[in-house]
Amino acid sequence: MPTIRFVREERDVNCPVGANLREVALKEGIEIYGLKGSLGNCNGCGQCITCFVEVLEEMDDCALSPLTEVEKLKLKRRSKSWRLSCQTLVMESVIVLTKPQSSFKNSHAIIKEAKERDLPV
Ligand code: FES
């Protein structure tokens, strides 16, 4: 069972193989949206481009489903490490940062610690 390490929230969440990243986050009470997305979003249809996560580390290159056509189009001008959580399926354990466009207190130290801690396979 993969583990998603949500760095900002300092939480590890287990999910079934193939789980939708956005749905797991919402079910666990993890806020995936920034201000714009919380005011209005497409509810996971891949249209609003507000459900970004940054992938900080994957167990291997196949930890997440490949970029969808929607992501290829919508993320053209974004960091290569960003995904739309509503388009992303979790196949293996992964470390992600929600709302990568927003800074947070002690982010460097928290990210460093999250990457150093063992991630369950
Ligand atoms: S929820 Fe709108 S693009 Fe992901």
Image: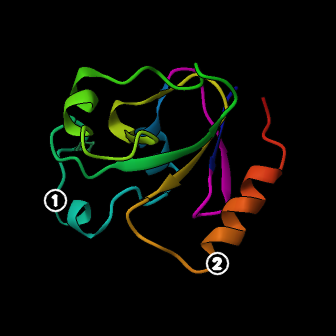
- Dot 1 surroundings within 10 Å: few (below 14), some, or many (20 or more)? few
Secondary structure of the magenta portion, mostly?
loop
Which amino acid type is marked by label 2?
Asn
Q: Residue at x 43, y 59 (%)?
A: 100
What's drawn in magenta, residue-wise?
6-18
Q: Relative to 16, say whether 96 is above or below.
A: below
Quadrant where the N terminus sits is top right
Q: From the viewer's perspective, tell me whether residue 73 is left or right of residue 112.
A: left
Picture quadrant where residue 120 is located: top right
Whether 28 is among the magenta residues is no
Image coordinates for residue 77, horizontal then vertical, percent: 25, 45
Whether the residues at callouts 2 and 1 have beta carbons within 8 Å, the answer is no
Q: Which residue has dot 1 on it?
A: 40
- In the depicted view, which residue is nearer to us: 79 or 114? 79
Q: Is residue 7 magenta?
A: yes
Q: Residue at x 46, y 21 (%)?
A: 65
Q: Disc 2, ligand 1: is the CB inside 8 Å?
A: no
Task: Give the answer, above or below, for where 62 lies relative to 21.
Answer: above
Would you place residue 30 above or below residue 69 in this image? below
From the image, which quarter does the C terminus lie in?
Answer: top right
Looking at this rendering, what residue extends furthest in the bottom direction? 105
Query: Dot 1 lies on which element?
Result: loop
**What is the distance, in whole Å, between disc 2 and disc 1 at their CAs?**
29 Å
In front: 116, or 37?
116
Please tell me which residue is depicted at 41% across the width and 30% down the height of the picture: 88
Q: Quadrant of ligand 1?
A: top left
Residue occupied by mark 2: 106
Mark 2 or mark 1: which comes first in sequence? 1
Question: Of the residues shown, which amino acid type is indicated by label 1?
Answer: Gly
Q: Residue 79 in the image: x percent, y percent?
A: 38, 46
Nearest to the observer: residue 4 or residue 101: 101
Image spot of residue 106 (x, y percent): 64, 78
